[in-house]
Image (cartoon, helix red, strand yellow):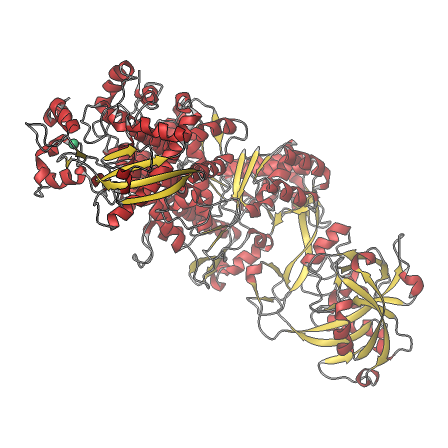
Amino acid sequence: MTKGVLLPRATPPFTPSTITHWRATKPTLPFTQKRSIIATQPPLPCFLHDFSKVLSRTACSSSRRTNSNGLSYSSRVSLAKAVSINTNMSNYCTHSTDEFCSSKRRSRGPVMAAKRAAEGVTQEDGKYKHTVDLPKTTFGMRANSSQREPELQKIWEENQVLKNIADRNTGGNFILHDGPPYANGDLHIGHALNKILKDIINRYKLLQNYKVHFVPGWDCHGLPIELKGKCYLLSNIACSLLFHLPMYKLTWSLDWEARNNLTPLKLRAKANKFAKETVKSQMSSFKRYGVWADWNNPYLTLDPEYEAAQIEVFGQMALKGYIYRGRKPVHWSPSSQTALAEAELEYPEGHVSRSIYAVFRLVGAPVVSNDLLHEFPNLCIAIWTTTPWTIPANAAVAINPKLEYSVVEVESLDERASSSGENKKKKFGNILKDEKIPCLIVASELVSRLEAKWGVKLAVKRRLLGSELENYRYLHPIDNRECPVVVGGDYITTETGTGLVHTAPGHGQEDYVTGQKYGLPIVSPVDDRGIFTEEAGQFSGLDVLGEGNTAVVKYLDENLSLILEESYEHKYPYDWRTKKPTIFRATEQWFASVEGFRDAAMGAIGHVKWVPAQGENRISAMTSNRSDWCISRQRTWGVPIPVFYHLQSREPLMNEETIDHIKSIIAQKGSDAWWYMTVEDLLPPKYRDRAAEYEKGTDTMDVWFDSDLYLEGTDQHRGWFQSSLLTSIATTGKAPYSCVLTHGFVLDEKGLKMSKSLGNVVDPRSVIEGGKNQKESPGYGADVLRLWVSSVDYTGDVMIGSQILRQMSEIYRKLRGSLRYLLANLHDWKILQRFVIVDLSNFYFDVAKDRLYVGGSTSYTRRSCQTVLAAHLLSIVRVIAPILPHLAEDVWQNLPFQYTTEYGSVAKYVFEAKWPALNERWLDIPVEEIEFWGKILELRTEVNRVLEVARTGKLIGAGLDAKVYIYSSDASLAFQLSELCEAKNDADTLHRVFITSQAEIIPSLDDEHVKNIPYSGECLIQGKTKVWIGVSRATGSKCERCWNYSEQVGSISDHPTLCGRCYSVIAVQMPPEVAAVS
Ligand SMILES: [Zn+2]
């Protein structure tokens, strides 16, 4: 038989402390229930959540007893509350000392006295000190994390603990796929949250006997690199901004001289080196967090096999017809003829645009119409734009469906307008001088502002909701096409303009999105130099930022479409290098068409488990609205889109043969080959003789991944979760994961976003190692950081700051103290094995006689109590291990005995010990008994109050100086309490629970004797049972050894200073040296 099996047998029938401890043990029960929940797929994500819930629920029952933990921090701190159980537990133990208890105890017991005596402090009662069992442990009170955690990590690494346990485990595979961070610089607290959550899950699964594989990854391609001067400056740009970083752009973001010498290959070599260095440094930080992974075999998106796999996926989608070439607007710099990333734009002060108010004539109403055109046959919509040159590319006018609009009549003209008053800033349009000015539609809220601006009176003729305007049609002011009025987004406001927005999908991001929704043409009649193309008709050849703009304004005015032109100063993007204005311009891009597999994707979403559940709504909404998806990136650093273009026709060449050929080359040589090999070599044999007709594409592609469980930030509903889902559906028809768990973002303590300018950034490294000022920001170690991760409700945004960290460290300290208490009282537990195996079952019903320290080393009471302590320690240490692996391992390495698993092997490391199993017997305690002990604990609190009053009144010092009297009119309670007072086993008696020398249940309050009890009080137990409590000095004299008062002290002739109990203990106790040998 092994300890693991035997432990529980000792538990139920023992002392009050046993029962009390049993209450504290309770958290392990729901955990085990939870195991069954977790065993159903998907196994993991519920863990943390339930863990927190269970802990906080369990903690509540005892938390009313004490608030000594000072946990004023929010209800989210659930593990934190659970820890209070442990501290309470030590409160229950009679002879705990300051050193081992987290909360200060008022009464000092014989242990302290013995300890002082052992330390050479003169004490009268030193005579019996060797008969008192002092706590002993090698486990330090101080965590000393900066030293101890790396030591423990070294032990794990050198002994390959993760690999060995995973190999040995028999519970099947568990694979959590790592969504890779960009290899672009130092880690922030969000990375820590993400990786620690993953590690907690992995370690939990490891304890649950799973073969855990965790392969960490890095996205080395989504790499924003800027070279400023001679240093790499790493910008933390969101991936959306990477979309538009073109190849030559990257070279330009390097310094001027470097740029001229830098071929794509040289650039790629630099990026490769940089990415690998970053991976190395991030890896060492993750290791320091205590994250376990296969660090020797990470997956990097720059690995050739990974790149080839991407080409494969792309090829499959292309061959299924899901890939096509289309246009999308990007920031474009005509002055350097390149696309720009957001990071490469500047917004200088003082930019002035020529803004215009223009009108477009309505010509058609939707079928179900409220007939505006009948009532107002000469009706126009008024728009406002700061880029008149985009009017030729106009494809729609967008309204906000929730805004109110008005049909207005222009009634009288201001002098300035009618006299064609002009100044530098304003020029009124000819239309205002026309006899028949049409009625206009503008947002109601803007009417008075427009009156002032245009110098007119506007009479409101009709009001209507924006949604009623949808699908009206108007004539394009330049080429007389019919265009629709469409519903735009929330970007349409009444802050400026008219409330109706000129929409040119080829020249604006929001316009493009609206255009996708309505299938609007993406017109962009502008070339690389910013010159109108032939498509722009009469404007062809004109510079859009100069004479082209002027020409468009002039044309509109001549055709009575211009109300007003005025200078408008605003922020406008400039090329950061040339310091010249940029434009938005549609360029050719590769797209994945979502339409072909949208239904399949929506279906697959329903089969995935989303944690939290609203994740499903988010991704469903995003996927159902998903427009086609731009997969090409104008970057040199990445996996190339395997396409050739015909030099004359620009027709792309891409088919099964070309893709397969390129894939095999990249699998062998890496994607650099695309840049250094010739077109001839990259083409399959069949096309080689035509190599001269083709050139290579220069775009790279968005990166894709597959996995089982995904656990990333909520922003990934839009990003990785969705792109993975869609690519997987497109290629395999199945979702790439069975479960997706998301966490929120990390904010500061006030709930503000972290930013350098606010100075509220929490750096995970300084949480662990401490900041510059160690007093203000001490190093807490990885476990405190991990404890924080476990304490937050990660499903929403979470907060961190110095206050929260201090609380976490306090909780950690208490937890450590409690574990130390448990460890220290088990120093001689080896002997217990014999006790458990041989004696316990024989004397199962023989109740304990003595307590932990003074009850005698070999006494059943002490042993039973130790059994409970051991059960606690072994459960707690394993339960906290996923969250606080360093603390747990530190405890394990200091266990004063070996732990043998149910498989018969010795667990050298805590993770070899497996998750604690449910013990049915512990659940068998009758409900009435649990309720009774609930009452007792409540009563104990009330008794302590009266004792406190008596102490203040100088009647007593320690609790042991007192005798407690209880009266209850509830006969059944009184009976139960009397039974407890007379319990034959010494440890179970009521006065031991109260930690007083005596307790008595009195039958009536009328007795004369009662009137002489100096201190008393009344209380309600469980809100209904009235109990009277009295306190007087204990009778008899104080025992030298156990400090209890007893009438027997003085009556034993060889030991006149001992009570009867102590006398019987020392009479049978082995001398300490003998005990040590056995
Ligand atoms: Zn005694």
Vertical arrangement, residue 798 with respect to residue 463, above or below: above
> In percent of the image, x 71 and y 36: which residue is there?
599
* Quadrant holding the C terminus: top left
Count of numbered badges drawn on the protein: 0
The residue nearer to you, when weighing 623 against 829, is 829
Vertical arrangement, residue 249 with respect to residue 605, above or below: below
Ligand 1: image quarter: top left
- Res. 671 in view: no
- Left or right side of 258 for 148: left
Vertical arrangement, residue 382 with respect to residue 1041, above or below: below
The residue nearer to you, when weighing 4 against 332, is 4
- Left or right side of 43 for 620: right
> In percent of the image, x 42 and y 61: which residue is there?
230
> In percent of the image, x 45 and y 23: which residue is there?
171
- Left or right side of 294 for 321: right
Residue 367 image point, x, y percent: 90, 52
- Res. 510 in view: yes
The residue nearer to you, when weighing 487 against 339, is 487
- Left or right side of 935 for 250: right
Residue 495 image point, x, y percent: 69, 68
Q: Quadrant of residue 724?
A: top right
